[in-house]
Amino acid sequence: MTFDYQTISTELNQGVLTAIINSPPINIMTAALYKDLVAFTQEVKDNDEVKVLVLESADPDFFIAHFDVELILTFPTDTPAQRLEELSDFHLMCERVRTMPKPTIAKIAGRVGGGGSEFSASCDMRFGLKDKTIINQMEVPLGILPGGCGTQQLPRLIGRGRAMEVILGADDLDAITAEKWGYLNRVFDTLEALDTFVDKLAHRMALWPAEAIALAKQSVLNAEMPVEEGLREEAYLFQQALRNDSATANMSKAMQMGAQTRQGELRIAELCIEVAKANQSE
């Protein structure tokens, strides 16, 4: 399976699709990269061979610098601003990585800013590199605002006050602070450690039943609902998951292999992998 894009190269390995963004010289989100990301995220969403998506950069200094300012300067301004009834293609692209029924991971080993940060913030998980990963929302100093979901996703991700600091302050947010605030899941001291962890996590998740992954992600997204509504949805999605053949198979195999025994429960993380691999081999 190959994904053919000018600015994105890919490798699919055991359900994990690694996508390498390459838009020289500094990974600006040009029209070409933007067009590729819109189409690519749609293709990944609809491809059942892909169980986990990992996004990274070919440039060691930039994940995605920001959206192309020269392109923004061509946007029409000769008519009054209007409220659109439908989401923009950029918003839809960000919503795809946020809501597609498979995990999306941004491996941010360098700078990310503007629309690149908004895209990253929409992914399920973000991992960074100490003394290298930097987040910056530079829109307000340019006279605009983060219009690709930043004013909506950042408050949900790091809280209102911190989002105000990032957006209105427009200063560099270092990796350690970004981890403390919740923008980054984890920060690593070396690129090797970052690569190893993300690879292990992605391939671990790819072992689980696709139906369970999709329903669990959907239920987590429902945390934005009022709590009682979210709990009702959680109960409904649990019932859906229980009716998948993979649920019966994996739970039964887990019991056969030592779940609910002292020895099995003391190594439950490893047991989960053994159960998945045992069922896949049958």
Image (cartoon, rainbow, N blue to C red):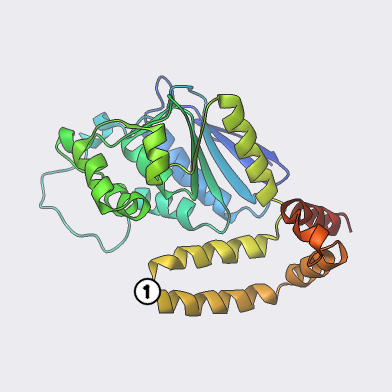
Classify residue 194 by image quadrant: top right
Crowd tier of the residue under label 1, counting other residues whose Cα lies within 10 Å: few below 14, some 14–19, many 20 or above: few
204 lies left or right of 20 = right
Q: Residue at x 39, y 71 (%)?
A: 225
Q: Residue 64: x, y in percent?
A: 41, 32
Q: Position of residue 136 (x, y in %)?
A: 30, 34
Q: Residue at x 22, y 46 (%)?
A: 164
Left or right position of 16 against 235: right
Front-most of residues 74 and 252: 252
Residue 33 vs 104, above or below: the answer is above
Figure quadrant of the C terminus: bottom right
Residue 111 lies, in percent from the top left, at 39, 28
Task: Work out whether 182 lies above or below 141.
Answer: below
Label 1 is placed on what type of residue?
Pro
Out of 49 and 281, give the one closest to the viewer: 281
Residue 107 image point, x, y percent: 51, 36
Which residue, given by chain and number where applicable, does mark 1 sit on? Answer: 226
Is residue 151 among the parts visible in the rendering?
yes
